[in-house]
Image: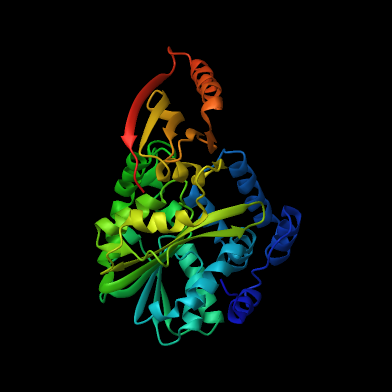
Amino acid sequence: MQTYKQVDEFMKRLDLKYFKNTKDFVADLMYKTDKEYTTEVATFLNSRALGQNSDNDSFYRLKNKTLAGSLCVSAAFDSGVFRHIGNMLVDNSDLLCGTVLDIGCDCGIVTCFMASENPDTKFIGVDKNELAVNNAKELAESLGLENVEFVTADVYDFALEEKANAVTSFRCLLDIAQTQTKGVSVIGERGEREARYAEAFSPLAKAVCDNLSDDGTVISVERYTALYGWLGWMSALSNNGANPLSDKCALMTAQDISSTIEYSVTFAQKGSTSSPLEAYDCVMSEKFKSGAGVDGANAEYALYKDSDEIHFTDVKKGEKLIHQFATAVSPKGKYMFYEADLDRRSIKYVNEKKREKMMSDFEDKKKMYNPDEYTMNDYSVKSCT
């Protein structure tokens, strides 16, 4: 993806800089706000890092106490992905015409960038957080933008008077659909898992498509990826009339203050004939190599791409799926051994000589689960990409 000068200039104007470490972020936040606010933010983020606080609404209320604070926090955690999004939006500016609705706009960073680059287009940013919307209005005013407005509203209940030519969402789906996706497993047989995500995303997909014109486009960059949720999100959009544009969908990697994060890039359009599975396969097949042991989403993709039938064993504690084993045979006669838990996924290809050892290792791992506490379910599925 090409890097554009106007993206860099916009980032610099808002001082959305990279922070090398947490110490630099805290120092900059204190300089731009005050000690009390900085302590609040640091305490909240520390508790989240320890898994003690997952209340996203509280975080965004705290983040948006002031525009300066909100921009600084965004710089720490989102400047990398915002830069990539900006470059992508310049490449696809032809889709940003007429009226564009940006859902989950937060303090308006990406909405204002789109508005600054497309002065003849009307942009409407929507967020349920009034503090964020107030910051977005302040940001737009400081940039002298007259073609953007911001509205405090729940996107599930929001309806435009005139349908949008495009509806965008950037790094907000995890927050908007948090209630709906709660309890949906991040592992499990792909078809069943992603069908559950599609069902969870369906109300949001309907709200998006109800606000979209007959030939309108959905553009989203989200933290639901090939690991889980992305295929479900594309399916939910498709079920509501917006099918993916396979040649534009992609995976995006960006750096934040603490880690490298992968995002899914979804382009969907009313009138497109591509299926979610076709778009998914188009993206994932680029890095697929038969016979290669891999980790993460590529491991699951290899399992489905490179076999005709998969034999699963699911390990559950109560209703929660915590571990999954699978075996299959590739077209070249290699034996495939797949394993997934809540933190990792991996696949290995072995020949006949090593097959017995791998089967023995799998059986030993299964024996570690006490049948009084855990249940195991064996089943097979026909695979397809």
Give residue 73's position: percent from left, percent from top.
62, 60
Q: Horizontally, is 306 left or right of 351 in the view?
A: left
Q: Image point 48% across, 35% down: which residue?
A: 334
Nearer to me, 291 or 20 = 291
Spot the residue most to the top. 372
Could you say where residue 274 lies in the image, as x and y percent from the top left?
A: 30, 62
* Coordinates of residue 139 in the picture (x, y in percent): 54, 75
Query: Is 104 in front, or is 91?
Result: 91
Q: Please say whether residue 335 is visible from this viewpoint.
A: yes
Residue 141 vs 26, above or below: the answer is below
Q: How is the model colour-coded?
A: rainbow
In the image, 196 versus 11, the foreground residue is 196
Image quadrant where residue 16 sits: bottom right
In-image side of 175 versus 273 (left or right): right
Camera-nearest residue between 187 and 32: 187
Residue 254 locus on image (x, y percent):
59, 60
Q: Quadrant of the N terminus?
A: bottom right
> Number of numbered discs present?
0
> Which residue lies at the image location 43% right of the left edge and 13% below the top edge?
371
Instruction: Give the vertical position of 256 relative to 126 (above or below).
Output: above
Q: Residue at x 55, y 43 (%)?
A: 292
Say if residue 109 shows up in the picture.
no
- Where 39 falls versus 121 (above or below)? above
In the image, farthest residue toward the bottom: 120
Task: Write the residue at 30% across / 73% down.
Answer: 216
